[in-house]
Amino acid sequence: GDGGLSTTTDPSYSYGGHGSYNIKLVAITGTSCTDTISQTVDVHPNPAAKFTSAGVCRLSTIDFTNNSNIATGTIISNEWDFDDGGTSNQTNPSHVYANALVYKVSLIVESDKLCKDTIIQDVTIRELPTVSFRVEDTCLRSIAKFISLSNAGEGSIQDFNWVIDGVNKNGAIVNQSFTIDGTKQLSLEVVNSYGCKSQGNGQFTIRPHPMADYETVGICIGEDIEFNDLSTPVSEIAS
């Protein structure tokens, strides 16, 4: 049907394209008697398996978009293998990876004529940052210093997003003053160069300034004068 010939009894043949082909068989006996039969064979197209993925961070949702297509017919089956024990038969699945590795994700698509195609692609999952920080100079009316000790995980840290007692600040080291003492809330979100985010939360205490005061007992010459410390708050005074 496409110019190909064979003289074997039970041949196999591969067609380069889909379509309808007229197959002719001529049977010849040893005495040169012949018979001919012609039949049409429909060769169906293979689907073309394709996909893309969005998202690269560990413990985040990775969305897979199935871009497979077929010239005629329909794709009726999608078999995903995420290379970590996870599988799916959805058209456009999502998956969460527990570890930062390179995974070989495979997709097998099958048409309504049982023709198949497979694609395997690398999907790289990146590590999350680790959040840590230190707070210095926490006396009332002093300028408190907030220092990020965070690790990028992979790449470098691109953003430091602080919320300090309801105030937003950005930077590896930020300053904030307070007019009211007490326990304050703090959060820090860091974002690395792959867009992976982590957040840490904590508390810190702004200490009141002491108020120095004293009284004396005995003010005569030659007598010992007694000094009584009346500074407040007593619980905050160390010396």
Image (spheres, grey):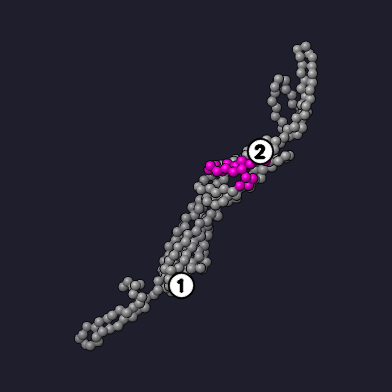
| Amino acid type assigned to the residue bearing label 1 in the image | Phe
Q: What span is colored magenta in the figure? A: 76-93
Which residue corresponds to mark 2? 110
Task: Answer yes or no: is residue 172 visible.
Answer: no
Which residue corresponds to mark 1? 178
Residue at x 76%, y 22% (from the top left corner) = 25
Q: Quadrant of the C terminus?
A: bottom left
Q: Is residue 69 left or right of residue 40?
A: left
Residue 184, percent from left and from top: 45, 68
In depth, the one of 112 and 2 nearer the eye is 112
In the displayed orientation, state which residue is furthest to the left.
222
Mark 2 falls on what kind of element? strand
Residue 16, percent from left and from top: 72, 32
Residue 1 drawn above or below residue 83: above
N-term mark: 2 or 1: 2
| Amino acid type assigned to the residue bearing label 2 in the image | Glu
The answer for how far apart the CA atoms under marks 2 and 1 are is 65 Å
Which mark, by number, is residue 168?
none
Give the quadrant of residue 226.
bottom left
Q: Judge the density around disc 2: few (<14), some (14-19), many (≥20) Cα neighbours within 10 Å.
A: many
Mark 1 falls on what kind of element? loop
In depth, the one of 145 and 20 nearer the eye is 20
In the displayed orientation, state which residue is furthest to the top.
31
Residue at x 45%, y 74% (from the top left corner) = 180
Residue at x 49%, y 52% (from the top left corner) = 153
